[in-house]
DNA sequence: ACTTTTGTTAACTATATGGTTAAACCAAGT
DNA sequence: ACTTGGTTTAACCATATAGTTAACAAAAGT
């Protein structure tokens, strides 16, 4: 009787926390994002989720498909962050300030996502088609036009909007993607590095504005 | 007789090209840098080198050690490029112009090296110790002092030299490390992307100088 | 109550893969 | 000619790993 009751409680609690399918996805995210497709082991994901390995196949059929679910979810977290800068109506300066601030906050909370996506896209460029077909895939047209217009109106110095876009995302993302390397080069510890990243929210924006504003 | 002679010719030619040990290292570079430690297969490296798999272990003992040789070689190609900007005596402006130009040329020739090093350092932060012990490991002290001095002398606007350094390497390296993603976002083909990278040698330098010079 | 569907488990399978070995090969020294 | 030491090969081994299965358990219909 006690065991039955305990069983029910355990079931109820874990069901409340998350059902098995979610548990698997969460565990798979944790493992895949840290170790990549090749470095991840199905058994390790099962252990992380605290369930039997067969359940992975029961819910997701194969490693490839489970990986695909993780990849798509990661990208659909990243994409809206990019769209934010591209598709609102504030001035370029405001956009850049908001973007640097929001994006660095976002990456600080999900430090593995950008490098995960970049790594896997490098190893498997076919995934590009997969993400490009997503309706939320970021589109640069509006941003390009806006930059051109502000250049015409002498608000900005002449600059190629594609180069500007690359500069912005490079400075926001790279220090996270390459953090072990950059930490080593700067010779700072994790805590100081975090402080540098926090300061960067404003530093980057000022730097870019100084570079482009007349 | 004919076969013996042919054998000799073949041996002579391949020996002239490169000995077995070099052939292995070259093949290992090609495979490891594209697929990473986890994605690489010893058999694939042997095939690429056109030799028997046992030779890999004969010359390099284990996958780990072969990988280590590739990693160290890659980093010792990358490091001098960084030292160049840090340890000569020209002004910050000149340094930045030279660095953007040289570094982008370098990466264009070895496009896999930065992402390889960054990826593997992410998966195995212990390697940081390995590369930091290298006597050629880049040191930022001189660069930091020089920036501080030029700020004092009102040549540069007030800026944190670590942030500046991150900005420089981010803009130079990121578009290569994340090239499939950036190509997709900008919606450009490989050829146009190459042109963008070529233009970047000057664009980046101008951008940074505009940002920091009084 | 009982049947069916869904979820879960331990044990198993097939294969891929890093690594080993013993025999063969070959060039150089004697 | 023959010995020796480094080099190369095919076959082999042990293990790790993705995926399967068959039996069991629980829930949900009926």
Image: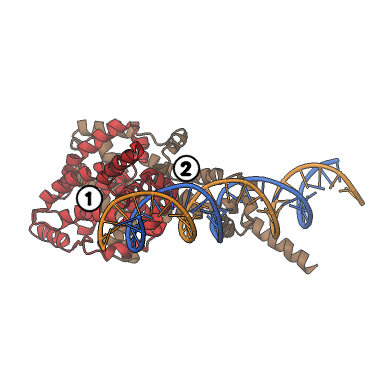
Chain colours: A brown, B red, C orange, D blue
Please give the chain letter of the residue carrying mark 2: A
**Where is mark 1, residue-wise?**
B168
Q: Nearer the viewer, residue A66 or B37?
A: B37
Residue B190: quarter of image? top left
**Where is mark 2, residue-wise?**
A76
- Return the x and y of residue A123 as percentages of the image width and height: 41, 43
Residue B139: quarter of image? bottom left
- Return the x and y of residue B153 as percentages of the image width and height: 7, 58
Q: Is residue B199 visible?
A: yes
Q: Residue at x 58, y 52 (%)?
A: A24
> How crowded is the residue under tag 2: few (<14 C-alpha within 10 Å), some, or many (20+)?
some
- Which quadrant of the rendered structure holds the N terminus of chain A? bottom right
- Which quadrant of the rendered structure holds the C terminus of chain A? top left
Q: Residue at x 37, y 64 (%)?
A: B126
Please give the chain letter of the residue carrying mark 1: B
Tell me the mark number nearer the camera, choosing from 2 and 1: 1
SS class, disc 2:
helix
Q: Is residue B27 left or right of residue A2?
A: left
């Amino acid at each position: 009787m006690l065991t039955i009751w305990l069983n029910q409680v355990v079931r109820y609690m874990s069901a409340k926390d998350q059902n098995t399918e979610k548990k698997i996805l969460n565990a798979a995210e944790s493992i895949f994002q840290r170790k990549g497709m090749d470095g991840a082991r199905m058994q390790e994901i099962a252990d992380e989720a605290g369930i039997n390995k067969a359940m992975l196949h029961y819910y997701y059929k194969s490693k490839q498909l489970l990986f695909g679910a993780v990849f798509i979810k990661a990208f659909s977290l990243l994409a809206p962050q990019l769209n934010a800068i591209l598709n609102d109506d504030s001035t370029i300066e405001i956009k850049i300030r908001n973007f640097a601030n929001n994006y660095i906050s976002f990456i600080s909370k999900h430090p593995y996502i950008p490098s995960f996506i970049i790594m896997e896209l490098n190893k498997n460029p076919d995934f590009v088609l997969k993400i490009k077909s997503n309706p939320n895939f970021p589109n640069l047209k509006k941003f390009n036009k806006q930059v051109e217009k502000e250049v015409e109106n002498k608000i900005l110095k002449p600059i190629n909007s594609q180069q500007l876009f690359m500069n912005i995302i490079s400075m926001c993302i790279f220090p996270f993607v390459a953090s072990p390397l950059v930490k080593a080069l700067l010779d700072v510890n994790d805590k100081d590095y975090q402080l540098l990243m926090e300061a960067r929210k404003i530093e980057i924006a000022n730097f870019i504005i100084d570079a482009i504003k007349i």
